[in-house]
Structure formats: structure tokens, C-alpha cells
Image: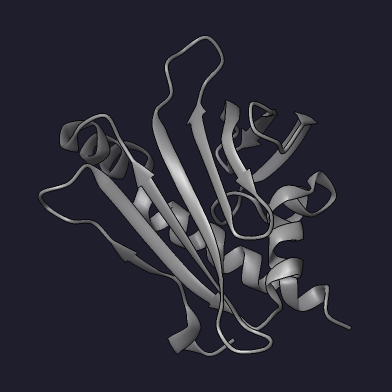
Amino acid sequence: MSAAAKSEARVPADEPVIEISRVYDAPRELVWECFTDAKHLQHWWGPNGFSITNHSIDVRDGGRWDFVMHGPDGRDWDSIITYTEVKKPERLVYQHGEPGEPPLFVSTVTFAREGARRTRVTLHARFPSIATRNDQIRDVHAAEGGKQTLDRLADYIATQQG
């Protein structure tokens, strides 16, 4: 991938959102599969230096993904994603949080075709407030971490295309 193909983030001052997008040189069905199948997710999910352990995943309306993100500093992040809308291969909507806690944010991920063999993924994360979003940007580098995650997906997809 060229430097121009890196993920781009948008953080509007007047909305509690982070929006990150990236174009992949891959068909939408492959990108969707990499985003929704545990056998793929374990290879790319999370910012640089992170790994994950999947406990369970059920990608359907009302389904859950239960996993742990392992940070390069040794810290573990228990995570629960609850899917509220799954429209294969176009759209995912999910709440992301920690076990026993209210969701930290709600994400809408779209998978748009760009020509015959390219796919634009746009991740739109909505936080309860601008202050909460800003805390996540400051404390866990949410915008940069999201960009790195989508960039890691590009590297992984390249290994899946012969």
C-alpha cells in the first residue's frame, strides 16, 4: 500500500464522534470476512503492538464478540462488542465496552465498493459526549489506535490475496 492509502481520521469539534476511513485493494466480501471472522480478527485487530484472545464471537443482530486485547505494555483490556445491526456485506453497528459496564461508544462500520476490486471501510464511533470522546483520545489514543487498526487490516488482507 502506498503512503497515500493510509487510514484517515476525522474528529469534528462539535460532535462526539471519531470517524476513520481506509480504502482496501480487495473485494468487499473479503474485507467483510476479515472484519467478522475470528480466524481473521486475531491477526489484525487492535493498534500496533496489540494482540487479542477471542473467547466467543456471534456476528448477528443481538450477537456478541467477547475478547481480550493485550497491550504491548502487558495490560489486558477485556472487551465486549454487542452487534445491534448486521447487514452482510454492507454494514455493522455495534456497542463496544467492557464487561459489566455501559458501552463506551457505538460504532457504525460501512463497507462500500469502490470499483470492481476496492472497498472503502468507514468506521464511525459515537461517544456519549464530546468530553468522553476527548478522554478516549487523550487516555487511550482512540483516533490514532483506530487508524493503526485499519492499517493493520490492510497488511493482513494483502496476505489473503494469493
Taking the spot 70% from the left edge, 60% from the top edge, the residue there is: 32
Q: Residue 2 location, x and y as percent?
A: 53, 90
Q: Residue 149 location, x and y as percent?
A: 55, 57
To which quarter of the image does residue 158 belong? bottom right
> Where the N terminus falls, by quadrant?
bottom right
Which of 121 and 91 lies nearest the eye of the viewer? 91
The furthest residue to the right: 162
Q: Residue 69 location, x and y as percent?
A: 62, 36
Drawn side of residue 71 relative to residue 123, left or right: right
The furthest residue to the left: 14
The furthest residue to the front: 87
Drawn side of residue 133 relative to residue 125, left or right: left
Taking the spot 59% from the left edge, 89% from the top edge, the residue there is: 115
Residue 97 shows up from this direction? yes
Which of 57 and 62 lies nearest the eye of the viewer? 62
User: How many tags in the picture?
Assistant: 0
To which quarter of the image does residue 27 belong? bottom right
> Where the C terminus falls, by quadrant?
bottom right
Taking the spot 60% from the left edge, 60% from the top edge, the residue there is: 90
Taking the spot 69% from the left edge, 30% from the top edge, the residue there is: 67
Residue 141 shows up from this direction? no
Which of 38 and 122 lies nearest the eye of the viewer? 122
Compared to residue 133, the image places residue 144 above or below, namely below
Drawn side of residue 36 relative to residue 104, left or right: right
Q: Residue 146 location, x and y as percent?
A: 45, 54
Compared to residue 144, the image places residue 5 above or below, namely below
The scheme the figure's colours follow is: one colour
